[in-house]
Amino acid sequence: MQIPVIDFSAFLDSSSSNDAKLKVAKSLDQACREVGFFYLSGHGIESSLFADMLSNAKQFFTTATPEEKDEIRAKPSGEGSGDDSRGYRVVERADAGYEVGPPYTKGLGRNQWPKTPASFRQTAEEYTTHLVALGVAIMKAFALALDVSEEIFASRVDESFWQLRLAAYPGVTDGVDQSKSGLYQHSDFGILTFLLTDEHKGSLKVLAPNGEDWISADPIPSTQHKVLHASQDMRISIPFFFDPNWDARIEPVLGNAEKKSKGEGVNYKDIFTGAIKYPY
């Protein structure tokens, strides 16, 4: 199995023909059905922004003092930010998300941004703005590939409940069981995950369609998965979860009229709050 590389530039170009956009949309559709992962090029985001995100994340994890990290630690609901899914965790992870509220309930809260480095918040917010716009464009491409109105998807992601996560995987020292040095096998439950990683190769693995083989998803310029980090150096990974609006109703868009008329579907906020597990 090979992870496809999809050039998205034609879909973003207003001068592109309908056929050119449909070709891109169909490529995305095929990648999602057959692989579950794809590399995206031609996305219009400057590489310098990616470099700044990775650099800032590494600087925070390696130079911020314990006091600075504790200041933005994820707190149990009711303490400060109102939500214990945002902030720093001792597993070397920092989370932020789309801000809804107050009032704050489970899953909702105020972001807590690191002060080290000083440019952290500005860079992260710029990065988020670009990825939200890209996520909306990809959803429109999905609609085109499925031959349904793009408004069906666009209306459910125009206030995407995104989550930005910065994770550091410490270097593996001699004598450590390398099979337990990353992140367990899992799949993400939202719509899209945009993953930015540093130059380490062999760490991210994608489960092949046969359900047995693991394929390396190494970073290049431009489904089920796990992280098996065996390097002695710290690895930085920045997943951005592009999800529906907090109050979006998710329903089938394809299928017979009788099935759709039964009102099958779920509320996104119920899926999110039911899936998050806090380490307290």
Image (cartoon, helix red, strand yellow):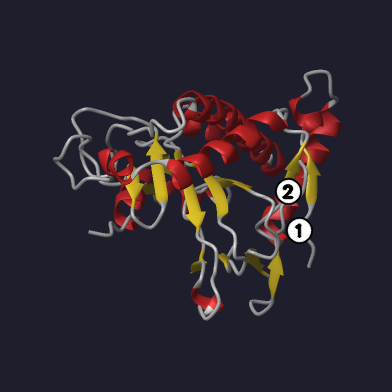
Name the residue: 40% across, 41% down.
64
Q: Nearer the viewer, residue 58 or 151?
A: 58
SS at badge 1: loop
**Residue 198 got which mark?**
none
Q: Residue 69 occupies which quadrant of the picture?
A: top left
| Mark 1 to mark 2 CA distance (whole Å) | 7 Å
Name the residue: 41% across, 35% down.
245
Q: Nearer the viewer, residue 1 or 139?
A: 1
Dot 1: few (<14), some (14–19), or many (≥20) neighbours within 10 Å?
Answer: some
Residue 51 place in picture, x, y as percent: 65, 36
Q: Nearer the viewer, residue 257 or 30?
A: 30
Left or right side of 22 for 33: left
SS at badge 2: strand
**Residue 39 got which mark?**
2
Left or right side of 276 for 34: right
Name the residue: 32% across, 34% down.
112
Q: Is residue 149 visible?
A: no
What quarter of the picture does the N terminus occupy?
bottom right
Amino acid tagged 1: Ile
Dot 2: few (<14), some (14–19), or many (≥20) neighbours within 10 Å?
Answer: some
| CB-based contact (under 8 Å), mark 1 and mark 2 | yes
Residue 114 place in picture, x, y as percent: 38, 34
Q: Outermost residue toward the left?
A: 78
First in sequence, mark 1 or 2: give its number.
1
Residue 120 place in picture, x, y as percent: 47, 30
Left or right side of 246 for 206: right
Q: Is residue 104 above or below residue 36?
A: above
Q: Which residue is mark 1?
A: 3
What quarter of the picture does the C terminus occupy?
bottom left
Name the residue: 54% across, 26% down.
129
